[in-house]
Amino acid sequence: MILKKIPNGFYSNHTEHLIVEELRKHDSLSISLVAEKEELLIGHIAFSPVEISDGTKNWYGLAPVSVKPQFQNQGVGKKLIREGLKILEQKNADGCVVLGEPEYYQKFGFKNNSNIELMGVPQEFFLSLNFGTSTPKGQVKYHLAFSVTPEDDRFYL
């Protein structure tokens, strides 16, 4: 996976739309929320089930989070994340993982948990939020949709 730093300091490989498309195609998009302003789509967030090597069930991955650049740093992503986590809790999810900037995601209660990891990712950038009483231990695996590359989209510019 090749990630590029974009102006606001976050990273993207510009495949977010492809990931969401693949998750939908495989009926693995558990929560999908959009933000609109004056009928213009300005943001999107997705949650999908993850596998944990110890067999723990009912955990989800938060990804991707996308906000149009001109609407970033205005609270759009925060509102989407808060609403998505609220819905996950209402669905009785046991927890959620996210790969991202610790400072940002800690605002929502995500913490570094050395018991779970994502292969090939520095531990400090892989965070979890536990809703239930189970504490998983092992490797986390996202849906195969997350392995899509920009070359997979013939319309990618």
Image (cartoon, helix red, strand yellow):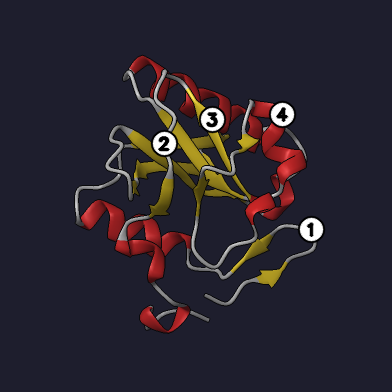
Q: Earlier in the sequence, mark 1 or mark 4?
A: 1
Could you say which is closer to the camera, residue 43 or residue 152? Answer: 152
- The residue at which mark 2 appears reads as 136
Report helix, strand or loop for mark 2. Answer: loop
- The residue at which mark 4 appears reads as 107
Give residue 127's position: percent from left, percent from top.
Answer: 59, 42
Dot 2 alpha-carbon crowd within 10 angstroms: few under 14, some 14 to 19, many 20 or more: many
Q: Amino acid at mark 2?
A: Pro
How far apart are the alpha carbons under marks 1 and 4?
17 Å
Could you say which is closer to the camera, residue 65 or residue 97? Answer: 97
- The residue at which mark 3 appears reads as 129
Q: Which numbered marker is on residue 63?
A: none
Left or right: 157 in relation to 133: right
Residue found at x 43% / y 77%: 149
Q: Earlier in the sequence, mark 1 or mark 2?
A: 1
Q: Amino acid at mark 3?
A: Leu
- The residue at which mark 1 appears reads as 9
Report helix, strand or loop for mark 4. Answer: helix
Mark 3 vs mark 2: in front: 2
69 up-or-down from 112: above or below: below
144 up-or-down from 106: above or below: below
Q: Amino acid at mark 4?
A: Lys
Q: Earlier in the sequence, mark 3 or mark 1?
A: 1
Tags 3 and 4 touching, CB below 8 Å: no
Q: Amino acid at mark 1?
A: Gly
